[in-house]
Amino acid sequence: MNNVAVIDYGMGNLHSVAKAMESLCKDVRVDVTSDAGRILAADRIIFPGVGAIRDCMAEIRRLGIDTIVSEAVRQGKPVLAICVGMQALMDSSEENGHVDCLGLLPGTVKRFGGDQGLLDADGNRLKVPHMGWNCVQQRRSHPLWQGIADNSRFYFVHSYFVAPDDTSQVAGATEYGHEFAAALSKDSLFAVQFHPEKSQHSGLQLLNNFLHWNGTGSTN
């Protein structure tokens, strides 16, 4: 049995992710939980998130999720972070004035366009939040890209984007007014700004790849 823990801190599309995982394989048990023992006992961990980063980080720290995620990464357990879960891995975020995050990946989270707004190549103003389908260019080979064509489309909903200090950790990139990181990878950690559970075939393929990923450069 493949045991997957979806971390529950009250700030994610938990049941959408859980149902997507359960639809992929009969031999999978998905546990939506905030319990440290159950999370760390799982074979794989999903760290989702939606909403304001200040509220997310407050709950993450209140429940000790920061320690749990750090320990899972230290153990080399496969971890998939989604949307605000990805942003929470960084050093800090510009959202809500300034919020300190987990610091597991070096870099910051920035707002699209800042005070000047966001423009396309023709000078037209783009809406924020960024909401819709974007092609993701695969910047480095990774087991989670297996069976997914380069420049496949994924579904995004966000007003802030990740700006990593170490560009070698960018596993996928896309554009909305400018290029930004759509996926980051380091050791047993893979993080995506898009929502794979809402991204139809390509998103389900990524989740299926995660079910077979051992946290290294290969799959089980």
Image (cartoon, helix red, strand yellow):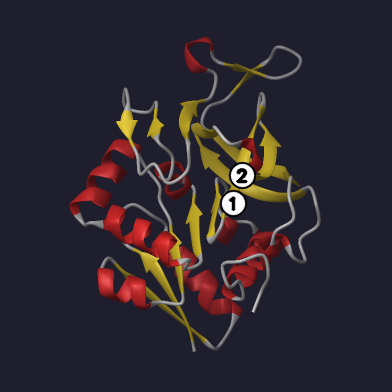
Query: Image quadrant for the C terminus?
Result: bottom right
Rendering quarter of residue 99: top left
In the image, farthest residue toward the front: 74
Work out how far the residue at label 1 is from the one at label 2, CA to CA, in angstroms. Answer: 5 Å
Residue 173 at x, y percent in the picture? 68, 40
Q: Which mark is residue 169?
A: 2
Q: Which mark is residue 15?
A: none
Q: Would residue 12 be found to the left or right of residue 172 on screen?
A: left
Q: Would residue 220 be found to the left or right of residue 13 on screen?
A: right
Residue 9 visible in the snapshot: no
Is the residue marked by circle 1 packed among few (<14), some (14-19), or many (20+) residues within 10 Å?
A: some
Could you tell which of marks 1 and 2 lies nearer the N-terminus? Answer: 2
Q: Nearer the viewer, residue 23 or 56?
A: 56
Q: Nearer the viewer, residue 201 or 81?
A: 81
Is the residue marked by circle 2 packed among few (<14), some (14-19), or many (20+) residues within 10 Å?
A: some
Residue 133 sits above or below residue 114 on the image: below
Q: Amino acid at mark 2?
A: Gln
Residue 88 at x, y percent in the picture? 40, 44
Q: Which mark is residue 185?
A: 1
Residue 192 at x, y percent in the picture? 56, 50
Instruction: Tell me whether the residue at label 1 lies in contact with that at label 2, contact meaning CB atoms closer than 8 angstroms.
Output: yes
Residue in the image at 58% along x and 36% along y: 166
Residue in the image at 43% along x and 49% along y: 85
Q: Amino acid at mark 1?
A: Ser
In the image, farthest residue toward the left: 62
Kind of element beneath mark 1: strand
Residue 60 at x, y percent in the picture? 27, 51
